[in-house]
Image (tube, helix red, strand yellow):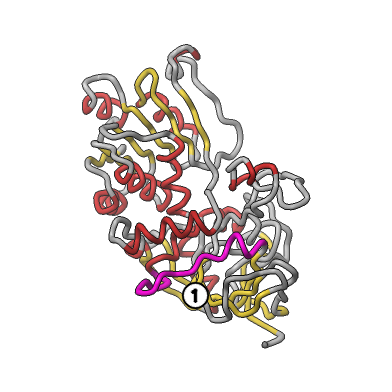
């Protein structure tokens, strides 16, 4: 096994670059995976801008596919060379939250919960934008890639697909529901796909960029609204006989889209919040029907664990979910600075970037 590897390291505001660092070793219950494909998440862009705190010197990235390179003591049922994906959320499977089925809020074996729960890779431990990365709680988090599928086919199940689809799941979307999704970035697109998969009869995608609205139609939206040209709340009401949508999914993390979600949902409806908010978020009285309109607001963090990833890959395998079409740009790991600049500034109609060590 090599002693050194190339990795993308956070060193300060808009400073993530390639460094040579030691290859990690697997401790008990852990695995080392050789990365074959990874990507950049919107949360990584927040780190790049120094809007989300991680320590300087941290290897970033949390959406990987790769090949098992080393297995620690106690990990069974896998072989060196198995192709796997590992989720952004790595639940331990044994803490209070995991035992209650709240995998995303995993506190680890020592049951010391911290905000953002089970998000470890590229956050509280070194991540996957590197030639190799260490997998904690490997027994619960190594998900084999089915034969016949490529890494590009399944890479996005590791975070954005799991997160976006969970927005529809948390809202309990039912057969015949009308669902509006505010923001058609990668998460919102997967939320639209999730709503359609769960039986929504009408999925409405809202964004201000035409190329995103075109992709929304491919991912499951029946109707798209460009908020620069139409009032999205009024249009949602028009499409629902004045009632409002059964479910509104907020996938951006802005006060405006949160309020529009509240204004778009019917009395007794559900607002499903997926966005990560910065600063103060306010709940306006009238759209919230003064707290007595039976409106529910639910929030969700990306579900994790190998069974979650297996189920999502089965959807890909059987043609129910096309995630590969969201990989619009490709880079080598050595081009990571160029990749961050393009993705974080949303240039060239980018959705997601594929990064190959």
In this image, 192 relative to 96: left or right?
left
- Whether residue 232 is situated above or below residue 54 in the rendered picture: above
Furthest-bottom residue in view? 2
- Residue 73, given in percent of the width and then of the height, sits at 72, 72
At a point 43% along the width and 30% down the height, the residue shown is 271
Q: Which residues are magenta?
A: 137-152
- Whether residue 265 is situated above or below residue 33 in the rendered picture: above
Splitting the image into 4 quarters, where does residue 268 fall? top left
Q: Is residue 151 magenta?
A: yes
Q: Is residue 319 magenta?
A: no
Q: Quadrant of the N terminus?
A: bottom right
Q: Choose between 166 and 284: the one closer to the eye.
A: 166
- Residue 301, given in percent of the width and then of the height, sits at 55, 44
In this image, 132 relative to 219: left or right?
right
- Residue 309, given in percent of the width and then of the height, sits at 48, 58
Q: According to the image, label 1 marks what residue?
A: 83
Q: Choose between 257 and 104: the one closer to the eye.
A: 104
Is residue 1 among what the camera can see?
A: yes
């Amino acid at each position: 096994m090599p002693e050194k590897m190339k990795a993308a390291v956070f060193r300060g505001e808009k400073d993530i670059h390639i460094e040579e660092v030691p290859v990690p070793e697997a401790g008990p219950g852990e695995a080392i995976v050789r990365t074959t494909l990874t990507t950049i998440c919107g949360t990584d862009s927040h780190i790049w801008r120094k809007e989300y705190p991680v320590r300087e010197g941290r290897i970033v990235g949390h959406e990987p596919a790769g090949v098992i390179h080393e297995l620690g003591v106690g990990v069974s049922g896998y072989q060196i060379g198995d192709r796997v994906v590992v989720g952004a959320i790595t639940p331990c499977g044994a803490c209070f939250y995991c035992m209650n089925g709240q995998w995303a809020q995993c506190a680890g074996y020592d049951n010391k919960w911290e905000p953002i729960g089970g998000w470890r890779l590229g956050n509280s431990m070194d991540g996957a934008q590197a030639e190799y990365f260490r997998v904690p709680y490997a027994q619960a988090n190594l998900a084999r890639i089915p034969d016949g599928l490529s890494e590009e086919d399944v890479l996005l199940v590791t975070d954005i697909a799991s997160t976006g689809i969970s927005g529809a799941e948390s809202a309990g979307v039912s057969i015949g529901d009308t669902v509006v999704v505010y923001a058609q970035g990668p998460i919102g697109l997967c939320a639209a796909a999730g709503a359609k998969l769960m039986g929504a009869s009408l999925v409405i995608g809202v964004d201000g960029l035409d190329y995103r609205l075109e992709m929304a139609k491919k991912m499951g939206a029946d109707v798209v609204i460009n908020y620069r040209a139409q009032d999205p709340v009024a249009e949602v009401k028009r499409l629902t006989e004045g009632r409002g949508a059964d479910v509104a999914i907020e996938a951006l993390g802005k006060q405006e889209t949160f309020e529009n979600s509240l204004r778009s949902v019917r009395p007794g409806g559900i607002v499903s919040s997926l966005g990560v908010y910065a600063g103060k978020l306010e709940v306006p009285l009238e759209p919230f029907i003064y707290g007595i309109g039976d409106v529910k607001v639910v929030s969700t963090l990306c579900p994790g664990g190998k069974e979650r990833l297996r189920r999502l890959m089965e959807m890909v395998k059987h043609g129910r979910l096309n995630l590969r079409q969201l990989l619009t740009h490709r880079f080598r790991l050595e081009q990571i600075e160029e990749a961050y600049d393009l993705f974080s500034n949303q240039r060239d109609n980018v959705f997601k970037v594929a990064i190959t060590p």
